[in-house]
Amino acid sequence: MTDVASPLFKVDWPGAPKSKFSPKHDSFNSNLSYDQQDEVFDRCVELARKISTDRIRCFDFWRLENPAPYRKQINEVLQKAFRPLNTDRFIVRGGYGIYYNIQPWQFGSFPLRANPPFSGVRNFEAAAGATPSLFLDNPFPAGSGSTPSGISVEALPKSYRYPETHQWNFTLESQVRPDLAVRATYIGSEQEHATYLDPINTPLQAPGPVQPRRPVTAFGDIQVINNGSTSNTQMLQLAVTRRFASGLSFEAQYAWTKQLNSFPNGGRFSEPTDPQNIRYDRGNDPRIRQQYFIANYLYDLPFGKGRRFLGNLSRPMQLLVGGWETTGIVTLGSGLPFSVTFDSPLEGWYSSRADLVGNPSVSNRSRSEWFNTAAFQLPAPYTYGTSGSTFLFGPGFTNWDTAFMKNVAIGDKYNVQFRVEMFNTLNHPSFGNPASDISSPSAGTITRTASAARVVQLAGRFTF
């Protein structure tokens, strides 16, 4: 990745190609003209040719009214990969980039509008007894109503830093035959200064009510939109692609992914379980299946006129046997990660993960016993559990969607197609994660599915 001067921000980075529009110092007074974009783009191309690279950053697309011409031009001129064997049949690609998320404008300062005095809650309750005291013509009587104690607010620190993501990739791709290609890709990513909600007004665990022990007792939760978390992703991708030839095309991809972060719910903007130790929640992302395979195909059945078999059929037999196609998508995935938790029975003791005291595995996993619940117990009162975050995995996912199409040609200009489409063709149930709260009698059992039942639909299309 080569840093290039950007006319949009008027910033010269070390080693960037000089433009006649480049300033002598950082500023922000660009007129965003297309002439500037063209001139810098030409310099970028010239530099790329000199250093034999296909990865450069010219400018930021999102500020352009119509970025399509520039994207197209860059794709045509710069996407020429390194060819170590001097052949078009084997190429090597690689790239590195640093990206920033302008978080405050998206989620940071925007929620602050909900804080008092811009927004608030006031409760109006009817008087005791059977006689109505609140009416639609005056639902909020003056001098009545109450404001709840412990108002929750959000805050944004002055020292907030934009989340910064480093991404890199390396790809080997080979054309095995004119209609067949294979690819292997390694992708890595490291995010720093990731955003989370820091509950600074949450007291330490201790017996008794929580509100009187808060650092600021006049408020409830005070969530500071902080950015001290991290996330790391490592991925291997394997793919094979066959272009349409001899009536068949297909594409298959396999991905192995390992993503670790400190977001207990998988998404950003979540509160840590232990506000004093955000790494307590570091574990597998609960939304990511570590192994995932997906394949699609299209096959013109080789029967009937113009096909490999039975090419001399009569018209009635051609209507019956010829013109058939089938297509489908096959999806396989490993189970989703989950944690084992408990519900606190005591005031001032926060619910969290359970203690691990044994082997959580069972010899024969089933929907009635997916993990060994006896391996877990409640931690000591007013402490956090010792079991890992999202270290167990649920059932895998399997699905096959398919369709059969019958094409009937009417002369040379018209065609009628009849389609039978089936989603979850085999009506195979893929189950969700087990109940994982050991305070519940259903812990360890699976009671829900993660896929819909089979759906069949019929369709027709007339083309001319």
Image (cartoon, helix red, strand yellow):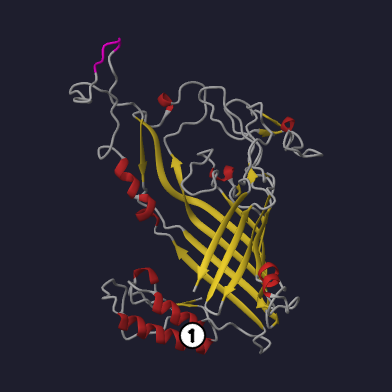
| Secondary structure type for disc 1 | helix
Q: Nearer the viewer, residue 49 or 128?
A: 128
Give the quarter of the image for residue 249.
bottom right
Q: Is residue 351 left or right of residue 253?
A: left
Asked if 182 appears above or below 196 in the picture, the reply is below
Magenta highlight range: 128-133
Q: Residue at x 51, y 76 (%)?
A: 1
Q: Circle 1 sits on which residue?
A: 77
What residue sits 37% from the left and 54% below the top? Answer: 106
Which amino acid is tagged 1? Val
Magenta-span inclusion, residue 303: no
Residue at the right extreme of this rendering: 363
Q: Residue at x 59, y 75 (%)?
A: 94
| Residue 337 percent location from the top left of the image | 64, 46
Between 359 and 136, which is closer to the camera in this rendering? 136
Q: Residues within 10 Å of mark 1 (few under 14, many from 20)?
A: few
Residue 350 in the figure: left or right of residue 117: right
Q: Compared to 407, does 401 lie above or below? A: above
Residue 74 visible in this rendered orientation of the protein: yes
Residue 297 in view here: no
Q: Does 233 sit above or below residue 186?
A: above
Residue 117 % position (x, y): 25, 37
**Rendering coords of residue 404 (x, y %):** 64, 62
Majority secondary structure of magenta residues: loop
